Amino acid sequence: MPVTAAITASDLVLSYGPATAVTRSSFEIPRASLTAIIGPNGSGKSTVLGGIAGLVVPAAGTVTIHDEARIAYVLQATKVNEALPVTVREVVGMGRYPSLGRFQRLQARDRKIVDAAMEDLDITDLAGRHLHQLSGGQRQRVFLAQGIAQDHEILLLDEPLTGLDITSAPAIDVVIHHSTGDGCTVVLTTHDLTAARAADHVLLMSGRVVAAGPPDEVLTPENLRAAYGHSLMHLDTTDDQLFIDDPAHVPVSGRHVHRERTIHVEGAESELHGG
C-alpha cells in the first residue's frame, strides 16, 4: 500500500535547551496538500516547522520525511543589511545554490526557474532593485520566490500571510495553491482561523498537537477551547461563531521562536543562511 503521508511524527518532543516547546505528539502530514498549523502564541507552531526542517533536533521521538523529499523552508523574519548590494534577482537565484556544485554559476535551466518563480510572485519588475528599497510585502514575495526556486517536494512557510499588503497576500495565496496542485506538500503556520479553515489538513497546537485532520473535524469549538483556553471568546451563541484573541508575534520566553534569515556577501559568493 503506497504511503500517503509526506511527513510522519511519532512521539515527538521538541525542546530549546531545558525548555520543552512541544510535548509528546504524533501526527501525519498528507502529501500534495496544504497543511495549516494553528494555535495560540507560543504554542509550538514555528518549532514544529523547525523540527520538520531538521533545524530543531527532537528531544524524543522521530520525524520521518518520506521518500527523502527535499525541503524548502521560507522563514518568517528577515534581517537585511541595508548596505548589501544584492538585487531581487540575485536573492531569488540563491534558491538554486543547493543544486549547484561549489563555485558553479547558474546555468540556462537555473535562470529559467528563477524567472518563473519571479513571475509567479509578480516581482519580475523588481528584479534590479535592492532589498532595502522594497516594502515588507514585496520582501516576503522575494523570499517565497527564492523558496519555490529551490528543488523541493515539501515547502515550509512560517506565517507567510501575516501583515501583508493587498497585492502581496493574494499573490502568495495563489502560489501556495498552485504548488499543491503541482504535487508539492505545503505546510504553513498561521494565527488566522479563516486561513486554517481553507487548508486541506490542520494541526491544532497548544504546546502539543491537540488535534489533527480535516479542518471541519479539527477546528471545532471544543478543540479550539482546549487549545486557546481563555483567549477564545464566543461572539454569537446562536450559530456558534468564534473569535480568537491571539495577538501575533508576542514573544513567549523559551517557546515562541521565529528563526531569522540573514543575507551577506562573502568574497565572490552570495549566500542565504537560516539563523
Image: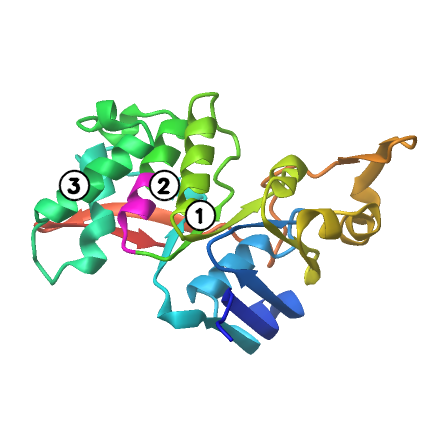
Dot 1 amino acid type? Thr
Q: How many marks?
A: 3
The verdict on residue 148 being magenta is yes
Mark 3 or mark 1: whose residue is earlier in sequence: 3
Query: Residue lying furthest right in this view?
Result: 238
Image point (43%, 43%), residue name: 77
Residue that carries the numbered disc 2 in the rendered image: 144
The segment highlighted magenta reads 144-151
Callout 1 secondary element? helix
Q: Secondary structure at mark 2?
A: helix
Instruction: Compare marks 3 and 2 and give the one earlier in the sequence.
Output: 3
What residue sits right under mark 1 in the picture? 180
Residue depicted at x 82% and y 49%: 225
Question: Residue 8 falls in which quadrant of the image?
Answer: bottom right
Kindly tell me whether residue 205 is visible in this rendering: yes
**Eye-nearest disc, 3 or 2:** 3
Secondary structure of the residue carrying numbered label 3:
helix
Q: CA distance from mark 3 to mark 2?
A: 16 Å
